[in-house]
Image (spheres, grey):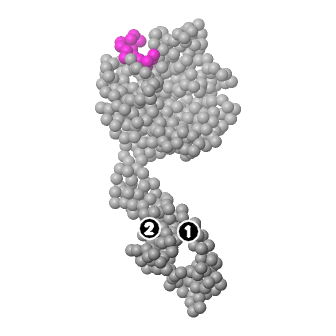
């Protein structure tokens, strides 16, 4: 079969035009970019086979297979048998580019034969969004990037590339935070690293705690101390031990150096299982959940001053798992499926059931009222505010799965956790997330951060600083290397 020189009127498809050629013309239609790209090579191959010698369809030739020039000897760069217009593969007057079948709404040349640019409404390979004239709004910036409140972040891998994570945060003055990272050594043993980061993300100091290792099953607790240092509660054991045997309270000064420590070991009183520290008025409250008998649990409450001197100790019946101190010296606790309030003498004032709770995070708002972020056994996730007398004031549904909660100096309530994301080919997929509410429980914004390799990226701890920023800590999944610790700072305004 010899080659047919055919010109196609854009408005019609005459029956005399071979079906394959008419299909090629339709492939130039910008409404079918994916089909056009996928079919390009197949169509070209089919036409060449159907028409005989491949050289007979070379633009500019007119033989029946000889491969030579046409009889007139013309060497024109724009052969007369190629239809003019965008999509013919030739850059002509008024066109910025023309890649033929490769013209695409997401390609290097658009279906209109123009070079892609931010604001054309087409998503180019180097753009994360493009809404055309709507760019600059809340969903796409003028630079064709998705708006974010994340200003700074860092990912830190331990020496053994194990399950490294940021497990606790506390706010410091001037927009800074102190973080606790759990890392695994090359010998396979966990260690604790405590660090301070300033508002610009610079690291002021870093301390690897000597001696005891943290027990990997329980997160530490961390609060700010009176001297711009921190108080850290740990459930620990000696190196090489499988089971931890004590809880420790460590006081670090403003430079990260150890000032004093307090230890509760397994004894006739019982076996310590958790360690929670908080400040209540002018005192430090250290609550250790103790196994005092077979399947019997209580809490040993130790009160200390800022120099580490023990003021008093006593056992209370509810086995405290979470505790936050009150300005009057009392504290609110989560224990045994209830919310409890104790006074400065560790005497119970009231309790409120938290029915069906699977996981609870606890904080106080600016007025000293308990804030609970919880997931119940059915999977429902809610943020709740209680009065100072333990009455539920309101509850709001959470979009993320909560792992931490705090109150911002401006009255906002901030929840850290994980956000469901589309599954990858290797694993289930969740992202780190932070969700912000106003003091009345109205949602304000939520932002998720995906790790480099998908997988399970988890927000584990949160702090709100006095400059209006929110710090999130957790871990990101790294292919073949388990998890790396992650720290990020968010600010209110979108960029």
Question: What span is colored magenta in the figure?
Answer: 333-352
The residue under the point 59% across, 76% down is 51
**Residue closest to the eye, 151 or 22:** 22
x and y percentages locating residue 104 in the rendered image = 47, 64
For the residues carrying marks 2 and 1, which lies nearer the camera in this image? 1
The residue under the point 45% across, 75% down is 15
The residue under the point 59% across, 91% down is 71
x and y percentages locating residue 82 in the rendered image = 50, 80
The residue under the point 54% across, 11% down is 295
Element assignment for label 1 = helix
Residue carrying label 2? 29
Q: Is residue 141 magenta?
A: no
Residue 43, numbered label: 1
Image quadrant in which you'd find residue 96: bottom left
Instruction: Answer above or below: position of 216 versus 449.
Output: above
Q: Are marks 2 and 1 in contact (CB under 8 Å)?
A: no
| Label 2 or label 1, whichever comes before in sequence order | 2
Residue 176, numbered label: none
Judge whether residue 225 can be spotted in this image.
no
**Of helix, strand and loop, which mostly describes the magenta segment?**
strand
x and y percentages locating residue 330 in the rendered image = 38, 16
The crowding category of the residue bearing disc 1, from other C-alpha atoms within 10 Å (few below 14, some 14 to 19, many at least 20), is: some
**Residue closest to the eye, 126 or 196:** 126
């Amino acid at each position: 079969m010899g080659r047919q020189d055919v010109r196609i009127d854009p408005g019609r498809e005459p029956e005399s035009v071979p079906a394959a050629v008419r299909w090629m013309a339709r492939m130039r239609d910008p409404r079918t970019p994916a089909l056009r790209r996928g079919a390009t090579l197949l169509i070209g191959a089919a036409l060449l086979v159907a028409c005989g010698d491949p050289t007979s369809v070379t633009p500019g030739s007119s033989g029946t297979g000889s491969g030579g020039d046409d009889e007139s000897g013309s060497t024109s760069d724009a052969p007369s048998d190629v239809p003019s217009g965008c999509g013919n593969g030739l850059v002509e007057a008024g066109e910025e580019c023309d890649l033929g079948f490769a013209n695409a709404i997401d390609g290097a040349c658009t279906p209109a034969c123009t070079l892609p640019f931010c604001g054309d409404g087409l998503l180019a390979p180097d753009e994360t969004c493009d809404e055309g004239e709507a760019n600059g709004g809340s969903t796409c910036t003028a630079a064709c990037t998705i708006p974010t409140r994340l200003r700074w972040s860092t990912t830190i891998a331990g020496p053994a590339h194990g399950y490294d994570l940021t497990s606790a945060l506390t706010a410091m003055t001037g927009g800074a935070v102190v973080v606790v990272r759990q890392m695994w050594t090359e010998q396979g043993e966990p260690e604790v690293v405590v660090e301070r980061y300033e508002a610009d993300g610079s690291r002021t100091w870093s301390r690897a705690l000597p001696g005891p290792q943290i027990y990997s099953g329980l997160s530490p607790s961390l609060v700010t101390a009176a001297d711009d240092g921190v108080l850290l509660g740990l459930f620990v054991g000696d190196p090489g031990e499988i089971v931890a045997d004590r809880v420790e309270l460590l006081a670090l000064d403003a430079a990260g150096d150890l000032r004093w420590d307090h230890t509760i070991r397994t004894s006739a009183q019982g076996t310590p299982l958790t360690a929670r520290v908080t400040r209540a008025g002018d005192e430090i409250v250290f609550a250790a959940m103790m196994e005092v008998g077979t399947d019997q649990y209580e809490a040993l409450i130790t009160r200390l001053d800022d120099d580490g001197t023990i003021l008093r100790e006593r056992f209370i019946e509810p086995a405290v798992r979470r505790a936050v101190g009150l300005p009057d010296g009392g504290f609110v606790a989560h224990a045994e499926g209830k919310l409890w309030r104790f006074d400065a003498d560790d005497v119970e004032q009231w309790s409120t059931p938290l029915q069906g709770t699977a996981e609870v995070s606890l904080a106080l708002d600016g007025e000293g009222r308990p804030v609970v972020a919880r997931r119940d056994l059915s999977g429902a996730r809610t943020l709740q505010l209680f009065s100072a007398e333990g009455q539920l004031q309101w509850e709001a549904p959470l979009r993320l799965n909560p792992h931490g909660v705090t109150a911002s100096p401006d009255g906002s309530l901030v929840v850290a956790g994980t956000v469901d994301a589309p599954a990858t080919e290797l694993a289930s997929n969740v992202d780190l997330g932070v969700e912000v509410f106003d003091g009345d429980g109205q949602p304000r914004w939520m932002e998720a951060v995906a790790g480099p390799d998908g997988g399970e990226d988890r927000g584990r701890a949160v702090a709100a600083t006095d400059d209006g920023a929110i710090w999130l800590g957790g871990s990101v999944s790294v292919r073949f290397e388990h998890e790396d610790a992650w720290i990020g700072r968010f600010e209110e305004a979108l960029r």
